Image (cartoon, grey):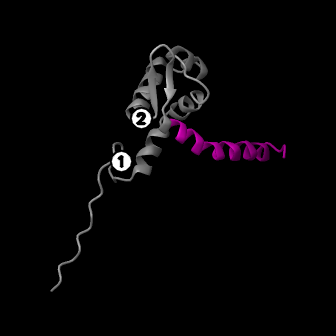
Amino acid sequence: MAKPASTPKKQAVRGSRSGRPIMALLDLLGRRWTLRIVWELRDAPLTSRALRTACDDASPTIVQARLTELREAGLVELEQGDGYRLTALGRELEQTFLPLHRFAERWSRHVNGSN
């Protein structure tokens, strides 16, 4: 009798018990203020204080927690003297979201009745 092929076990991905990277990424991005921080860093580096101001004076504790998570994920880095900025991977993520941003702008006009 032939031995059944073994199914490769999925490697765990931080933030996901299923091992599916998309689930871990969506979990990270779904946390409060995470996407806003990425968005605010799209043009230039910002200090922690400038970032909190850009995020409507979000709690310093929350902003720091999100920055730590984004740094651990390799999406944001701290550059001495300039503040926080997107890494190359963070810029790729930002570019991935631009079509969604354009869609949201069109959708908003549709929903608000100003086609």
Task: Find residue 96 and report its horizontal and vertical position in percent.
Answer: 57, 45
Above or below for 65 versus 110? above
Q: Image point 44% across, 32% down: which residue?
A: 70
Q: Image point 30% across, 57% down: which residue?
A: 10
Residue receiving disc 1: 16
Q: Quadrant of residue 46?
A: top right
| Secondary structure found at label 1 | loop
The residue lying toward the viewer, choosing from 110 and 75, is 75
Q: Amino acid at mark 2?
A: Gly
Task: Find residue 73 and report its horizontal and vertical position in percent.
Answer: 40, 36
Residue 40 lies in the magenta-colored region: no
- Numbered disc in front, either 2 or 1: 2
Residue 105 lies in the magenta-colored region: yes
Q: Give the label on residue 74, or none.
A: 2
Rendered-image quadrant of the N terminus: bottom left
Residue density around tag 2, few if under 14, some if 14–19, many if 20 or more, within 10 Å: some
Q: Earlier in the sequence, mark 2 or mark 1?
A: 1
Q: Image point 18% across, 83% down: which residue?
A: 2
Task: Find residue 58 and report its horizontal and vertical position in percent.
Answer: 54, 21
Q: Amino acid at mark 1?
A: Ser
| Secondary structure found at label 2 | loop
Which segment did they paint magenta?
A: 90-115
Horizontal arrangement in the rendering, residue 8 relative to residue 31 (left or right): left
Query: What is the residue that sits farthest to the left in this orientation?
Result: 1
